[in-house]
Amino acid sequence: MLLLFVLSAICLEAQLNLLTLREAESLVERIPDVVGAQKNGECPNLSPNYDVPEEFAFQVRSTCGSGSGMLIGNYTVNRQTGAVTLWGDDPQPVADAEGEVLAKQLVAQARQRILSTEEARCLALEAARSLTGWSGTDANVSVKPFGKVNRFESTMRFTATRSSSARPAQSGRLLTVNVAAALVRDDETGLNIVSAAVGALTSKMVELRAPLWLTDEDALSVGMLIPRVAANLRDGCKLYTGGAFYSHQAVMGVSCPEGRNMRDSNVLVNLQTGEANDPDTGKSLDSAESGRIARELLKQKKTRRAELQKEVDAACRPQ
């Protein structure tokens, strides 16, 4: 049932200000033809592909009903503008008025995800401390903006200075922070600065921008407590999920040895709420225990978010 979507060989840097895959999927799900297929009980399923860094390509097919397996359409979503078009040589727009409004909202939301001026300064300082020869007990490292600061440009530049408490000596470097990719370049070498400390701080900043949703692993914990799933988890069978085929749901099913798949155990878990439904009928499959676990996991997400914010605030507090 589940096949991981294919990614091209293009190497992409994370761009905080571009639409995410699931955000793009939410736009495709609102295309009139896709909405119509959903209303007709055809269970449209999205298979995404990265054609170019700033676009997602989607193939949408029916997965239930009399037309199961039939192609609904091929579409492209521009990650910068939110424009949704037909895929191919004649890229006609396919979004309706509601879809266009949502696209504008998501694009505005994405553009707000870039690093703040203070976060950029903080990341530049951590990167400066990671420069070869800039650590040590005698080091006093500081950074300050170089030139005019404009957060909504793609980069911010900082002058980094290392002073020594052991001798009358000082050195300096120019660092450039890509506020959309959360990367720091040493302008002397032209290379991005990579260290455990920089990586840890960057990962926290990026995680703070992620939605407070369940992960696939969380969704599996919920799915395993659905009665019709639990009844089939025997004789080496496993509950499996993987791939973003819906904008806010994880699809999962029981896979058994020798390639046997039990379609009657397929489940959709809403990553925003933890609710479980039948992929074909939309009928609720929640149990008391699955609901309890979902609520607990979502609560943990909020606690984790608060802890992360405290850690970043502490790391970025002026010394």
Image (cartoon, grey):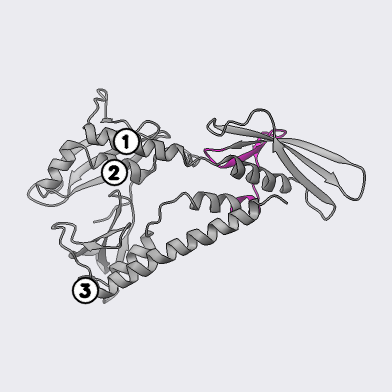
Image spot of residue 82 (x, y percent): 34, 33
When the figure is inspected, residue 41 is found, relative to residue 157, above or below; the finding is below
Front residue of 36/245: it is 36
Q: CA distance from mark 3 to mark 2?
A: 29 Å
The residue tagged with tag 2: helix, strand or loop? helix
Q: Residue at x 33, y 47 (%)?
A: 5
Tell me which label, 3 or 2, sits earlier in the chain: 2
Mark 2 residue crowding within 10 angstroms, few (<14) / some (14–19) / many (20+): some
Q: Residue at x 52, y 38 (%)?
A: 180
Task: Tell me if 183 is positioned left or right of 159 in this view.
Answer: left
Q: Is residue 183 magenta?
A: yes
- The part of the chain drawn in magenta is 179-200
Circle number at residue 103: 1
Q: Is residue 255 magenta?
A: no
Find residue 27 and report its image quarter: top left
Circle number at residue 209: none
Task: Count how many numbered circles sit on residues in the image.
Answer: 3
Circle number at residue 227: 3
